[in-house]
Image (tube, rainbow, N blue to C red):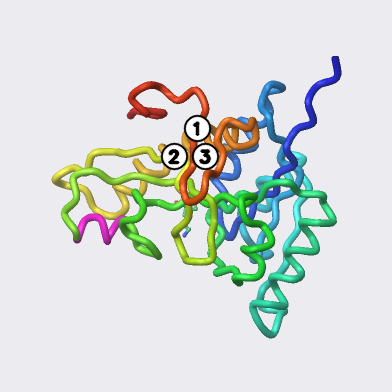
Amino acid sequence: MAAARKTRVAVLISGRGSNMVALLEAAKDPAFPAEIVLVLSNRPAAAGLARAAAAGIPTQAIDHRAFADRAGFDAALDAALRAAEIDLVCLAGFMRILTTEFVASWAGRMLNIHPSLLPLFKGTHTHRQALDAGVRLHGCTVHFVVPELDAGPIVAQAAIPVRQDDDPDSLADRVIVQERRLYPAVLALVAGGRARLEGERVVIADAAPDGALFSV
Ligand code: GAR
């Protein structure tokens, strides 16, 4: 019997790309339901591009500074994704706000990882925000992308305890470990058809009875 066609994924990055590397590692498993066919950055100097190229993955840089406005950049991005016949986009430390039009055209087919337990602490400096708020739990979220920044149906989250002596760097160091576990697991769920959008929420097939997907 022929193997099922794998979901063709583009990972969009702006920086070091450690989440992207975690996705590449996971996708090496022949049983993984997605293949990473393109790593794309808005920053030509992003360290993650070299890491992807070293792993033998096609890379592309589309420098946002070459465009007069967001719409022009997003049109170029859209064209590159369509040329590569991408099914699903994974934002992984991609630090550009996308236009409503672009997001609408990839609705239900674009994921993002954010370093907080959404809907808390949107935007930047999420670890500082968590410390300032005095929360006891912090973590990361993978969600479907909607036009509103850091909103959209949540697929999964991972939480860590906040320690008395944490600073933003120590929190970031523990959250990123969870990000690198969570994102590949979520990509497997979505690409494998086990996580599906039902209106504003995501329903996961065969979830554990207590709803838990991940523990730390
Ligand atoms: C990650 O912590 C990711 O959650 C965050 O940027 C970092 C990228 O690290 N993304 C955002 O803040 C998006 N708003 P990486 O390049 O090593 O994957």
Residue 13 drawn at (x, y percent): 60, 56
Give the mark nearer the N terminus: 3 vs 1.
Answer: 3
Whether the residues at callouts 1 and 2 have beta carbons within 8 Å, the answer is yes
Q: CA distance from mark 3 to mark 2?
A: 9 Å
- Disc 2 residue: CB within 8 Å of ligand 1: no
For disc 3, the marked residue is 183
Residue 52 drawn at (x, y percent): 69, 45
Of residues 128 and 121, the one drawn nearer to the viewer in this rendering: 121
Q: CA distance from mark 1 to mark 2?
A: 10 Å
Furthest-left residue in this view: 164
Q: CA distance from mark 3 to mark 1?
A: 15 Å
Say few, some or many: other residues with alpha carbon within 10 Å of mark 1 (under 14 / 14 to 19 / 20 or more): some
The amino acid type found where label 3 is placed reads Tyr
Q: Quadrant of residue 72?
A: bottom right
125 left or right of 98?
left
Give the mark nearer the N terminus: 1 vs 2.
Answer: 2
Say few, some or many: other residues with alpha carbon within 10 Å of mark 2 (under 14 / 14 to 19 / 20 or more): many
The magenta-colored residue range is: 127-132
54 left or right of 171?
right
Residue 180 drawn at (x, y percent): 49, 38
For disc 2, the marked residue is 156
